Image (cartoon, coloured by chain):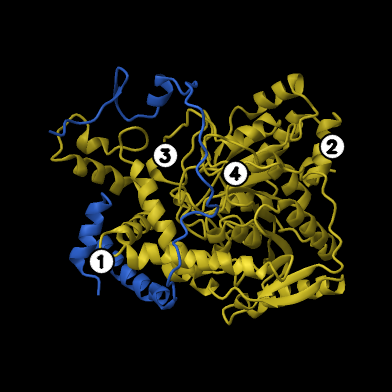
Chain colours: A yellow, B blue
Amino acid sequence: MEIIELTFSQLKDGLSSKKISAKEVSQAYLNRIESMDSKFNSYIEINQDLIGQSETLDNHGDRNLPLFGIPIAIKDNFCTKGLRTTAGSKILQDFVPPYTAHCIQSLQNAGALILGKTNMDEFAMGSSNETSYYGPCKNPWNTKHVPGGSSGGSAAAMSAKLAAATIGSDTGGSIRQPASFCGVVGMKPTYGSVSRFGLISYASSLDQAGCFANDVTGIAEVIDVMIGKDPCDATNVSRTQNSLTKLKPMDLRGLKIGLPDEYWTKDLSSSTRDVVDHCIETLESAGCVIKKVSLPHSPHAIPAYYLIAASEASSNLSRYDGVRYGLRDIDKVDGQSVADLSEFYKLTRSRGFGKETKSRIMLGTFALSSGYQDDYYKKACQVRRLISQDFVDAFKECDFIVGPVTSQSAFRLEEKIKDPIAMYYNDLFTTPVNLAGLPALSLPIGLDDNKMPVGLQVISPAFTEEKMLAFSLAIEQQVEFSEVPGV
Amino acid sequence: MIKKQEVAKIADLARLHLSEDEASELKSHFQRVIDQFSSLQTVDTTDVEPMLTPHEFSVPLREDLVVETLSVEDVLSNAPDTKDSLFKVPPVV
């Protein structure tokens, strides 16, 4: 069997037992990227030192390391020492970080190799990968369609088998939505589980790193390494972690599964609904007890999410001032006096940020400005607590919540980019999870009428990743989704 | 209604220059967002404390120890302009 066709477990076994070398695996993926990625534009940067690094690993590395020789692609908002990191923005087009993000360093310490950096919406602001300064990424299932976003490049690369696993970040659905659109598994753990140190900040109270893989086992292997204590992130939660890698499928008999009424709305396309409903029938046949639950405040998640995310972004992105790193408007200011310091910042920021980023910085500045703060930012934070409490109440009645990830499968390029509000509402079923800080994943369960993949969203109580993965593994075995894009 | 001057004021606070087109587009975008998001005002939040972060634990403290961090050379490596061990900016006074 060809290397790129191996499952995560087969690849891991082959590498640890020396049946295949890290160099062979790296070369196989590099060849595939070289021959195929021009169609998808899923990578912004390839690691030119990969082959040398894989040889070093083969010669001196410990084959018992959990991710020995596994080539992983990283969303371009994680700092990687010596490897350009742009966050999809022009303002960071020449930024080469002097350090590596904590969770990426953990992957490397576990023997993983970095294939390259993947395309994304600028500063993770977008749901279609079309706000990237480096051009849109295309969906491998149909290149006229978007891969989703903001981690569109990581989802597309996973789907087209251009990496053995990929890393993303999820602020309002940026892992689960593209995972659903591209027919791969994508997971965000509980807020605070994975250190945000070295993850370029968008909205700090919502941002959470996670990963993509072609199966639940692959997700468990990678996320197990990423979760860990880091004193450099004050919101990182210390906890005794059970190993996620000894995963067994959960016994589905008697499990209480909650379906939120608010997720089966009129906006849910009939084609997506059919696929999700069919999966739920399968779970019921396997012994799950299906229950209706309510998340009464979730319809307000979009306004609350966008106001909070934009407010935090307006503060976080103030660091791009043309002084310490990033683009500076050299032609106009270098060596000359400027009228005032504010003008110096404005010239650089106006040239370096794209349209959507400017729009969200503006929205956040507005929501935090005097006279409006109580009506917008504070109100959004109060609604956030109600949304979070809804989940606490719902989990008193069920073990897991499942539902659609999005209201429809991957839409066409340029279909929504001119209507930002329609684009925002694409995140209707994913943002409540971020506001509450819960773990959730998207699992591919079927194709819709357009032959595009549909994901099932699994939501679990905070810090119950092990159970969520065991449950998801059981669903995966029941559903047996085996479709692949015809690339 | 959001006024043109309000958009200009927000742009100034956000340290952004906007072209006429950008300002006009953002003005209508803002109006739509505010109209759409006005549904939030219908939610009863009497006595609800704002939730600023998912896990409201106390902030962890660490020992006040000197630890190794990046070298000055590394810190300056991405700066658009430097002099000696300093970031260089245009004269602003």
Spatial CA distance of label 2 from label 4 is 32 Å
Left/right placement of residue A374 relative to residue A260 reads left
Number of residues whose C-alpha sits closer than 10 Å to that of mark 4, classed few (under 14), some (14–19) or many (20 or more) = many
Dot 3 and dot 1 within a common chain? no
Left/right placement of residue A62 relative to residue A424 reads right
Question: Which residue is identified by label 2?
Answer: A13
Q: Residue at x 44, y 57 (%)?
A: A309
At label 1, which amino acid type do we have? Ser
At label 4, which amino acid type do we have? Val
Instruction: Please tell me how many numbered marks the rendered image carries.
Output: 4
Q: Quadrant of residue A273?
A: bottom right
Dot 2 and dot 1 within a common chain? no
Q: Is residue B74 above or below residue A388?
A: above
Spatial CA distance of label 2 from label 1 is 58 Å
Question: Which residue is identified by label 1?
Answer: B24
At label 3, which amino acid type do we have? Gln
At label 2, which amino acid type do we have? Asp
Q: Is residue A5 above or below residue B31?
A: above
* Marked residue nearer the N-terminal end (3 or 4): 3
Q: Which mark is residue A237?
A: 4
